Image (cartoon, grey):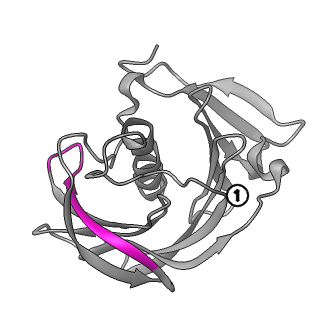
Amino acid sequence: MRRFLLLALGLAWAGVQHQAHAQDRPATIPTRDVDVTYRMADPTSNRTLEQRMRWQGTSQRLRVDSPSPGLWMLVDYRTRRLAMVVDPERRVLDTEAPAGAVMPGQLTAASFARRGQDTVAGQPCTEWETRDTTSVARVVCLTTDGVLLRLRRIGADGPPVMMEAVRVLYGPQDPAAFVAPAGYAHAAAPASPGSR
C-alpha cells in the first residue's frame, strides 16, 4: 500500500521542479484548491484501490490519504517537510524532503512531449509523455491548472492505467485537514541519502 502512496507523492513533488517551466511543459501541481479521488489497480492482489489527494493553495500543502485506513501523509511545499500520520497508533513520522525532491515514481525533468487531449472524471486534460526516475515511459493527463487526472504506463508489465481520477472537486479546503492531529507522538524519520 505504501508503494501507491509514494507514487502519488512523487508525482506531486514533481511540481516543485516543473511548475514555472516554459509552456511546453505542464503545471504539475494544482494552482487552486482541489480534492481528487483516484482509483488504482493493485497488481499484487488484482484489487482496485482508492486514494484521495487534497491540495490547499494558500498553505502550499498536500494531503494524501492512502488506501490503507488510518494512514495518511502531509507534504508542506514551503518548508519541504513530510509527515506520515498513523491514526491507530496516534503517531507521526516527520522527515525532510530529499534534496532535489526526487522521490519514487517522480516525473523526471528530462522531457515532456504533448500527446493529445482527453477527458477524465468530467475534466478536460492534456496527455504528456515523460519518464519516471527509473526511465520508464509514462503518460500523464494533466489539467491546465496542474491536476493529475490519469497516469498510465507505456510498454511495461502490469495494468496500463496505474491511477485515474474518479472524482474531482474544486473548492476551499479545510485547513484542519492539513495539520497532524494534536496529541499524537512525533518521531523523526531516519535521514535519507541526499536529504539536507
Q: Residue at x 41, y 52 (%)?
A: 27
In this picture, is 185 found above or below 170?
above
Q: Is residue 9 among the parts visible in the rendering?
A: yes
The residues colored magenta run 124-135
| Residue at which label 1 appears | 70
Q: Position of residue 78 (x, y in %)?
A: 61, 29
Instruction: Answer whether residue 134 is magenta in the image.
Output: yes
Give left or right: position of 50 versus 24.
right
Give left or right: position of 184 versus 105.
right
Give left or right: position of 67 versus 170.
left
Q: Residue at x 39, y 73 (%)?
A: 125
Task: Point out the residue furthest to the front here.
Answer: 23
Q: Residue at x 43, y 79 (%)?
A: 124
In this picture, is 189 found above or below 138?
above
Q: Looking at the image, which is closer to me, 193 or 88?
A: 193
Q: Looking at the image, which is closer to me, 100 or 18?
A: 18
Q: Is residue 42 among the parts visible in the rendering?
A: no
Give left or right: position of 117 versus 66.
left
Instruction: Answer whether residue 141 is magenta in the image.
Output: no
Task: Point out the residue furthest to the right here.
Answer: 183
Q: Quadrant of residue 37?
A: bottom right
Circle 1 crowding by C-alpha within 10 Å: few under 14, some 14–19, many from 20: few
